[in-house]
Image (cartoon, rainbow, N blue to C red):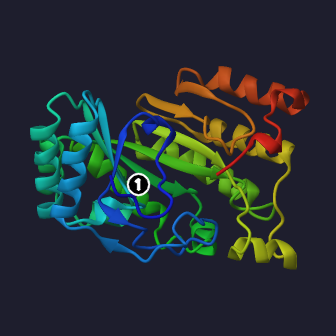
């Protein structure tokens, strides 16, 4: 197996076979994200990827899940993704699901028919980093996409039968935009109808633009109690019309939440409110990470 640079995957893909379909991130401009700074974006050829799949087949007798990295491998054209999914089916008939990282614009560039073909070929889940429901927060962090882009993309993928797991980042608006970030994020969760929502907490990467903004006083990060208040506002405003599994089990988080909206909202709110009063419920900073 050949991996270039650091390789990242969602928490739920911890035991998956990870295959780099692309190297780096096609956008790679978000002010808070250091994950692909060390890489120049490029796509890998079918032959490169197929060699890795064949090698993995020789080494692993049973592969339940496969995850295509890097940052937004869904940017590959459908006529390049379909042969990869077909290769997975041929080499790993026991594989239950193929997952992939994607941006909203990756989904929006594909037709409804293309999304259906990807689903039929085995693509089971797309991991999308929405980060915030606030247009102003997204603008400030140079996300390059709008809330409407995110909602439209999730609707189209879910309508094609592909589950979407959407990530939001607590604290991304700083103190200035804390309330806007939380309320609009909750509303977006309710509107988009994603199968899964994952909550992360902002970690400051040395050398990032957001790190420089903190040093200059332009951005004021939230403390632990602020983060809990923000989580409370997110949950209060997340008026989901269909079941949505929500998790905050990423290593960056101070509080682990697990539930299904809307039915578990009161329980999750109670957990958050208790954490506001008892900091012993929170993960110490020394145990947090990207």
Please tell me whether residue 185 is drawn above or below residue 104 in the rendered image: above
Q: Which residue is at a point 28% across and 37% down the rendered structure image? A: 59
Write down the quadrant of residue 67 in the picture: top left
Along the horizontal axis of the image, is 238 left or right of 90?
right
Provide residue 16's location: percent of width, then percent of height: 37, 37
Q: Which residue is at a point 56% across and 71% down the rendered structure image? A: 30
- Secondary structure type for disc 1: helix
Q: Residues within 10 Å of mark 1 (few under 14, many from 20)?
A: many
Along the horizontal axis of the image, is 181 left or right of 35?
right
> How many numbered circles are shown?
1
Along the horizontal axis of the image, is 88 left or right of 14?
left
84 or 214, which is in the foreground?
A: 84
Provide residue 260's location: percent of width, then percent of height: 51, 25
Please tell me whether residue 243 is drawn above or below residue 128 in the rendered image: above
Provide residue 156's location: percent of width, then percent of height: 27, 51
Residue matched to label 1? 151
Residue 116 appearing in the image: no
Write down the quadrant of residue 106 in the picture: bottom left
Q: Which residue is at a point 76% across and 40% down the rendered structure image? A: 287
Please tell me whether residue 145 is drawn above or below residue 240 in the rendered image: below
Please tell me whether residue 269 is drawn above or below residue 146 in the rendered image: above
Residue 250 appearing in the image: yes
Provide residue 118's location: percent of width, then percent of height: 17, 49
Q: Which residue is at a point 56% across and 33% down the rendered structure image? A: 247
7 or 255, which is in the foreground?
A: 7
């Amino acid at each position: 197996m050949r991996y270039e640079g650091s390789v990242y995957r969602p928490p739920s893909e911890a035991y998956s076979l990870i295959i780099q379909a692309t190297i780096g991130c096609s956008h790679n401009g978000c002010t808070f994200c250091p994950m692909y700074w060390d890489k120049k974006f490029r796509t890998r050829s079918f032959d490169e990827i197929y060699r890795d799949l064949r090698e993995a087949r020789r080494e692993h007798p049973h592969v339940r899940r496969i995850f295509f990295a890097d940052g937004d491998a869904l940017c590959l054209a459908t006529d390049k993704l379909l042969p990869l999914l077909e290769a997975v089916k041929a080499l790993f008939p026991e594989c239950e699901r193929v997952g992939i990282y994607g941006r909203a614009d990756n989904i929006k560039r594909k037709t409804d028919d293309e999304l259906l073909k990807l689903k039929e070929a085995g693509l089971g889940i797309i991991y999308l980093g929405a980060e915030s429901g606030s247009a102003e927060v997204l603008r400030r962090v140079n996300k390059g996409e709008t809330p409407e882009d995110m909602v439209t993309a999730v609707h189209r993928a879910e309508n094609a039968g592909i589950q979407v797991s959407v990530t939001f980042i607590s604290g991304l608006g700083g103190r200035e935009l804390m309330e806007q970030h939380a309320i609009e994020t909750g509303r977006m969760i309710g509107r988009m109808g994603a199968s899964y929502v994952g909550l992360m907490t902002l970690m400051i990467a040395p050398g990032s633009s957001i790190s420089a903004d903190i040093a200059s006083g332009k951005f004021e990060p939230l403390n632990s109690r602020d983060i809990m208040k923000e989580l409370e506002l997110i949950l209060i405003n997340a008026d989901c019309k269909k079941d949505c599994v929500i998790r905050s089990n990423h290593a960056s988080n101070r509080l682990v939440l697990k539930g299904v909206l809307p039915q578990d909202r009161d329980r999750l709110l109670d957990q958050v409110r208790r954490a506001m009063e008892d900091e012993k419920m929170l993960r110490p900073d020394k145990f947090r990470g990207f």
